[in-house]
Amino acid sequence: MAIQFILVLNRQGKSRLVKWFNNGIYTASQKQQHITDIHRLILLRDSSKQSSNFVLYQNTMKLCYRRYAGLYFIILIDLDDSELSYLESLHFFVEILDVYFDSVCEVDLVFNFYKLYYILDEIYLGGELQDISKDKILSRLQYLDTLDRD
């Protein structure tokens, strides 16, 4: 499995999205400890302004992250995976969110968390990058919205 988990954290470390693709490996307390450690690590790197968007995590995996306004979009991948492709997939995810929510902000993620998860599942499924066609994804989301209204 390439993707271990995807996180969206704000600057204060509050989780706005957490999707684990390997549920059986970690307990709830271990998951929370990972989130806390990752937030601390990324916040320190972000303040230096000289760091890349990739960091070795626990000597066995890599974190790829991007910051958009006050949110950090973070993905944990295997060591041998392509960092740039996953970094671009995070950007693609944010572009989809931006179109879908018409200029997405943190409040959209908080109050529409259920939509956020099905958007995530349209792009990443089972720890793998699923689809990268913006038009296809947006049309499926539009279709799901029509089902939601009925």
Image: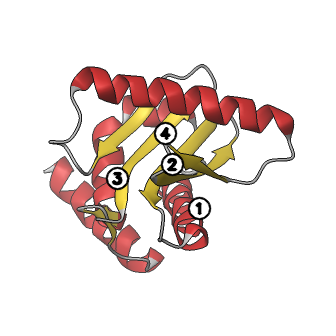
Label number found at residue 43:
none
Neighbour tally class for label 4: few under 14, some 14-19, many 20 plus, Cα within 10 Å: many
Residue 1: give x, y in percent of width and height: 28, 65
Q: Amino acid at mark 2?
A: Asn
Is residue 17 in sight in this rendering?
yes
Question: Which mark is first along the chain, 4 or 1?
Answer: 4
**Mark 4 — residue?**
8
Q: Amino acid at mark 4?
A: Val
Q: Secondary structure at mark 3?
A: strand
Q: Residue furthest front?
A: 59
Depicted 90 relative to depicted 106: above or below: below
Q: Secondary structure at mark 1?
A: helix
**Mark 3 — residue?**
4
**Mark 1 — residue?**
91
Q: Nearer the viewer, residue 84 or 12?
A: 84
Question: Which mark is first along the chain, 1 or 2?
Answer: 2
Q: Residue at x 37, y 59 (%)?
A: 3
Alpha carbons under labels 2 and 4: distance apart: 22 Å
Q: Secondary structure at mark 2?
A: loop
Residue 5: give x, y in percent of width and height: 36, 48
Q: Is residue 132 left or right of residue 141?
A: right
**Mark 2 — residue?**
59
Residue 23: give x, y in percent of width and height: 19, 43
Q: Nearer the viewer, residue 63 or 109?
A: 63
* In front: label 3 or label 2: 2
- Contact flag, marks 3 and 4 (Cβ < 8 Å): no
- Image-quadrant location for residue 10: top right
